[in-house]
Every structure is written in structure tokens, then in C-alpha cells.
Image (cartoon, rainbow, N blue to C red):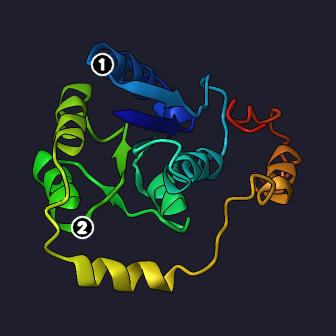
């Protein structure tokens, strides 16, 4: 299976572990960043995973931040994505089977790596059962606008780096996903 995975600085260790784990299981993994523990903004990486999934470059995605909340919300904003935040195996399984979720959100600070692996396995190894097709179609038709432009965050990136969001404290240059060309 082709899987995109991305995180902010809080999820780097978990992401790197999951990349190695998924590759060892025979999956093709696209690492959308970030690639270090340097403070960065989760929205960029959530969007990139979502873009990879929505444009069918990969089958599913995984996004990770400290709680999972921010990056999951960021990924959900992209047309063609159905994102769930899971802290247990049952939620991950149901998200795939009942709601055809194609991106899994995880919180690196609230879920241990052992449970995280089990949640990922449940998400990866379950498929949509097709029982909510009418609901899924209704949701998809509401998401009418394509928003795959990688430059849509240029102003937010500049604001972040210039300290607009951090009380005037300038931030390091954001390490953009390697998949942005």
C-alpha cells in the first residue's frame, strides 16, 4: 500500500518509527516531513499529506502532532479527504470500515508508540464496507472547491518565520515538505 505520512516537530520521533515500521511491512511510504525537532507549523504537513491522498498519489495518509488535533483538522480541510483522530484501535477500524476515512490522525504526546503501531495496523488493514455510501457522497459534494495549491500557505509561512504568531519572536525558516516542487 502507498502511504503518505507527515508531522510537526512534536511527532518526528513517532513518524520516523512508523516510516521504518511500515516499510518493514512492505508498504511504500512518502515522508512529507517535517524532518527535525525544530519548531514548525503543523498545517503545512497536514495539508501535504492530504494533498497526496486527495490527488491519489497515495492510497492513505497518516498525520501526527502533539495531540493529533491540530494536524488532523488541517488535513480535513482538503477536498477528497476523510480524516479521523484515533487514540484507540476500535476508532481506527470503524473509521475505515464505516466512514471510508483515508487519513489517520495521531497524537505523539498522548499515545504511546506500541499503541500507535496497533492503531496504524487497524487503519491500514481494514477497508470500507460500503454501508454509508449515501452519507459519504453527501459529504463529498459539499467539498466542492479544489485546494491543492502548495502556495496557499505562503503568507502564513512568512508570518510564522517573522514571529507574527509567536509574539514577535522570529522563528527558524520552515523546512518545507520535500514533495513540494
Q: Residue furthest left?
A: 90
Task: Choose mark 2 or mark 1, whichever is in front.
Answer: 1
Q: Is residue 56 left or right of residue 177?
A: left
Residue at the image point whose x is 38% and y is 64% from the top? 82
Residue holding disc 1: 26
Instruction: Decide if residue 141 is on the left or right side of residue 161.
Output: left
The answer to whether 118 is drawn above or below residue 91 in the figure is above
Viewer-nearest residue: 122 or 56: 56
Helix, strand or loop under label 1: loop
For disc 2, the marked residue is 99
Residue 94 location, quadrant: bottom left
**x and y, in percent, of residue 165 in the image:** 76, 56
Q: Is residue 83 above or below residue 18?
A: below
Q: Earlier in the sequence, mark 2 or mark 1?
A: 1
**Residue drawn at the location 22% of the way across and 60% of the way down:** 95
Q: Quadrant of residue 113?
A: top left
Picture quarter with the N terminus: top left
How far across and how far down the image is residue 19, in percent?
Answer: 41, 22
Who's the residue at 17% across and 68% down the image? Answer: 130
Q: Report the number of numbered marks.
A: 2
Count residues near mark 1 (Cα–Cα under 10 Å), then give few for <14, some for 14-19, many for 20+: few
Q: Compare residues 102 and 107 and report the one nearer the observer.
A: 102
Secondary structure beneath dot 2 equals helix
Residue visible at 54% across and 68% down? Answer: 79
Mark 2, Cα crowd under 10 Å, few <14 / some 14-19 / many 20+, is: many
Q: From the image, which quarter does the C terminus lie in?
A: top right
Q: Is residue 66 above or below residue 137?
A: above
Amino acid at each position: 500500500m502507498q502511504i503518505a505520512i507527515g508531522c510537526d516537530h512534536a511527532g518526528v520521533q513517532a513518524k520516523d518509527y512508523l516510516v521504518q515500521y511500515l516499510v518493514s511491512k512492505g508498504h511504500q511510504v512518502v515522508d512529507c516531513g517535517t524532518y527535525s525537532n525544530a519548531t514548525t507549523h503543523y498545517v503545512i504537513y497536514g495539508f501535504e499529506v492530504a494533498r497526496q491522498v486527495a490527488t491519489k498519489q497515495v492510497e492513505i495518509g497518516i498525520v501526527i502532532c502533539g495531540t493529533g488535533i491540530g494536524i488532523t483538522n488541517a488535513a480535513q480541510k482538503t477536498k477528497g479527504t476523510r480524516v479521523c483522530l484515533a487514540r484507540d484501535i476500535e476508532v481506527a477500524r470503524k473509521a475505515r470500515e464505516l466512514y471510508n476515512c483515508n487519513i489517520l490522525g495521531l497524537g505523539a504526546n498522548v499515545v504511546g508508540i506500541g499503541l500507535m503501531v496497533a492503531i496504524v495496523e487497524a487503519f491500514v488493514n481494514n477497508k470500507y464496507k460500503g454501508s454509508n455510501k449515501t452519507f459519504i457522497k453527501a459529504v463529498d459534494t459539499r467539498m466542492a472547491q479544489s485546494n491543492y495549491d502548495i502556495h496557499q500557505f505562503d503568507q502564513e509561512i512568512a508570518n510564522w518565520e517573522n514571529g507574527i504568531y509567536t509574539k514577535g519572536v522570529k522563528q527558524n525558516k520552515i523546512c518545507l515538505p520535500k514533495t513540494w516542487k
